[in-house]
Image (cartoon, rainbow, N blue to C red):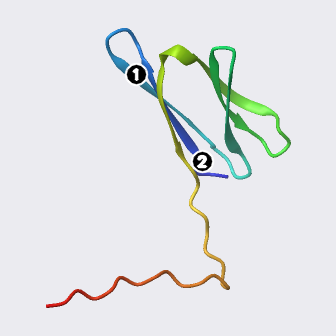
Amino acid sequence: MVGDRVEIVVDAGGATRTWEVEATRAGRRVEIAHGRGVVEVSEVTRGGTPVRTARFMASRVLALVEHPAATARMSDDEPPALPLPRPA
């Protein structure tokens, strides 16, 4: 979905570096896979074909922050809860 985004924070020898992988078109999503000492973040089409891939050594990855796409409200969804009034 457009808006799917993953931030990857990596230890770069005394400093940190940040990369972002984002779904750039409608219908694409961002997937994360890890195994054998490698973390792989890919932008994937609806059919499962990877478009862009970023690979990092798992021992150097400090954080993976996922930002899912905002879901659109449907007409039959419940309205959002209103905050309670504060006493004076």
Q: Which percent across, then down, holds residue 51?
A: 73, 31
Q: Which mark is residue 4?
A: 2
Q: Which mark is residue 78?
A: none
Q: Nearer the viewer, residue 18 or 14?
A: 14
Extreme-left residue of the structure: 88
**Please, what secondary structure does the residue beneath circle 2 have?**
loop
Is residue 42 depicted above or below 3 in this figure? Answer: above
Give, as a three-letter code, the residue at label 2. Asp
- In the visual, does 57 lie left or right of 60? right
Q: Which percent across, then down, holds residue 2?
A: 63, 51
- In the visual, does 49 lie left or right of 11? right
Q: Nearer the viewer, residue 86 or 12?
A: 86
Q: Which percent across, then down, holds residue 38?
A: 64, 17
The numbered mark, 2 or 1, whose residue comes first in the sequence reads 2
Neighbourhood count class around disc 2 (C-alpha, 10 Å): few under 14, some 14–19, many 20 upward? many
Q: Which mark is residue 17?
A: 1
Neighbourhood count class around disc 1 (C-alpha, 10 Å): few under 14, some 14–19, many 20 upward? few
Is residue 12 depicted above or below 49 in this figure? Answer: above
Is residue 50 depicted above or below 35 in this figure? Answer: below
> Could you tell me which residue is drawn at 58 percent across and 55 percent down?
69
- In the visual, does 80 lie left or right of 26? left
